[in-house]
Amino acid sequence: MKQALPILAVLAVLLAAIAVANPFFLEPAGFLAFLKRAAPLVILAAGQYFVIVSGEFDLSVGSLVTAEVVIAARLIDGDESATWPVLALLLVIGLFVGLVNGVVTTKLRVPSFIVTLGMLLVLSGAVFLWTGGAPRGALSESFRTFGRGGIGPLPWSVLILLAVGAAVIVLMRADFGKTLIATGDNERAAALSGVRVDRARIVAFMLSGLAAAVAAILLGGFAGVSAQAGQGLEFSAITAVVLGGVVLGGGRGSVPAAMAGAFTLEALFTLLNLYGISGALEFTVQGVIIIAAVAAGAIRLPRKFTPRRGDAHAAS
Amino acid sequence: MQRHKAAAAAFAALVLAGCTTDKPAATTQPAAPAASAQESGTEAQDSGTGAQSKFFVQADFDAQLAMRSQTPEGPADKPWEQAIAPKMIDTATYKKEGPYHLCFSNAAVNNPWRQVGWKTMQAEVGLHKEIGKFTALDAEGKDDKQISDIAELQVKGCDALIVSPNTTATLTPAVTAACGEVPVIVFDRGVETDCPVTFIKPIGGYAFGADAAEFLVEKVPAGGKVLALRILPGVDVLETRWSAAKVVFDRSGLQVVGVEFTDGDAAKTKSIVSDYIQRHGKIDGVWMDSGATAVAAIEAFEDAGVPVPPINGEDQQDFLQKWKDSNLTAVAPTYPTYQWRTPIIAALKILKGEEVPETWNLPQPKVTSENLSTYLKPNMPPLHYALCGCEDLPGFPEAWGGKKG
């Protein structure tokens, strides 16, 4: 948890700044609305964390989200009874896309940057071909409930976010988490000490795909069918993860910090919007954060091997 | 260390935000007279709408607004054949025998509006037996591809070339070059030359923006807070819409509390509108430069548990359906997709030596609560455009993604 402290401090400052600009933010409804809006990105960031900490990238999540929303609308087509089968199918598609990314990366030894960039193009091209540029069909009301509705004042998306958050923290504390970090930290050492490196990475990609599916369900529910639902989300997710102090290249960083990074990014966007600065600057901010974080990581890497912090993951 | 730098970047962005905020925040103060004391220079005269767009041309604005009340010539049940105040030109020099080979250089088919239009055009081609061959190239939204497409089509033996330019200035030389070879018909966006035989367009963006803004001025009580949502800045066809709305709002007693860019993204639109509802407690009207995200804006009000204020959308199916279901106070100015039929009709007229208007101004109806039921077609996909003029074409509604019934 202590790895998350710096980003939590930044987050607190941003939240305070939002509250100053918009006092409604301090009321439960205002804050819940913020959590609800942040939920898809936070979940994506959690998925992306698994991949990044294992030393890879997943650039395909944005177009996977778009594909999932478009597929859901086409298959449900306003029919309430189709909701649950389609929800299950979306999760399976997410896992499957992650499986393909993972297998191609690990077994065929294609760099994940290329694999997932290719997957991004394949998915966006396929969506365009299938829809002809204009999504068809409609989401059912019960599908949209997850992104729009809630139990009383508590939005479903916040509850789902809490569940996902708890699950990933448990997962990272379990053996899987330790092997994943070991894989990202030093692949050969991990393999020599008995970690099934490929399997850990494939599972990481599948979790990222699953997170994209959940994010798609929430986003589609929140805003409805759109061929741009997931646009740019892969970069937002990666930015969020590095903002949380997770090192690109793997091996270092915690999942609560990555999720806090997503909250911070969303808070930053909210703040920019509150002050009337919009659109293009969001990309600029993300670009600056990614470059700064990677540059900072490169600067400190040599010092990282001082004995002071040779903690658990290096030993496992 | 690295985390600190990331934090520093975030702070830098914050500081940046802080620096540039003062102006936009200031313009959200109450309307012109009250605010002028603490504001300086050009911003003093407006009602929160900011500076006028550099794309604004007063003469075009006046001409378009005047055209709205003129009665178009031509068959009333076929608006795609109608023209407002046409100045007919002789085309006898282009007359030749059929069958004809028509060619079309299309800017893109990358959005629902162009999808609907493109299907409509193909169906129109199917109506005419005298068209022996129809060659279309899709520039995929790239100027350079369209320039080479136009060059390629010139050597394919086209009898007439239809161009829907991707951008105005960049495509002008390519169109000028083609004019020397074949009769050229330009539609949708224009080019900066009058060498095409005819230029086909609906009335235009000023009329669209003004239609929506005038509706809000009429329906929102004086002093009401209006939120303006735009897709993105710097695109001529969208700038004209906003600049016309700005003129209308500046003359009115309405207070424009924000002008936001949505990137055409539904989630972003919904978030922006939710923020404004939170910040101002109440938004009394929403102006949009395009209807694609209108439903998301409406849902923001629904989810906040407040009544949906007067709003404008466009003739997209999802918006019209929502309008009817929720009985909204709404209007839908249009940029009709039936204009995709006209170039084919124009090309055949030219090749048969019949007169065509030099600038073919098509009527640009708006959907109002009175005529909503005539435009709302059941079983069409959510992003279909109602003014496609395609109901009588073969293959309707399936080819447009609709269902029979």
Image: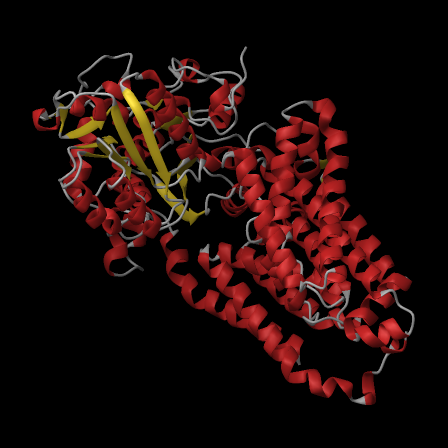
User: Which corner quadrant holds the C terminus of chain B?
Assistant: top right
Query: Residue B161: percent from the left, percent from the top?
Result: 24, 34
Residue in front for this viewpoint, A195 or A270: A195
Q: Is residue B165 visible?
A: yes
Q: Residue at x 30, y 16 (%)?
A: B129
**Which coloring applies here?**
secondary structure
Q: Residue at x 40, y 37 (%)?
A: B290
Q: In the picture shown, does residue A149 fall above or below A187?
A: above
Left or right for B239, reference B64: right
Tell me where residue A114 appears, x and y as whole percent: 62, 61
Horizontal arrangement in the rendering, residue B168 relative to residue B375 (left or right): left
B211, A212: nearer the viewer: A212
Quadrant in the rendering for residue A255: bottom right
User: Which x, y percent locates residue B5?
Assistant: 60, 77
> Above or below — where is A160 with respect to A267?
above
Above or below, B166 against A269 in this view is: above
Quadrant of image for the N terminus of chain B:
bottom right
User: Is A25 situated left or right of B154 in this image?
Assistant: right
Q: Position of residue A264 (x, y in %)?
A: 63, 62
Q: Quadrant of residue A305?
A: bottom right
Residue A151 seen? no
Pick the residue in front: B63 or A274. Answer: B63
Q: In terms of depth relative to the viewer, which is nearer, A69 or B178? A: B178
Instruction: Name the residue rendered at 36%, 48% in the picture.
Output: B30
Number of numbered callouts drawn: 0
Examine the rendered structure and indicate whether residue B52 appears above or below residue A1: above
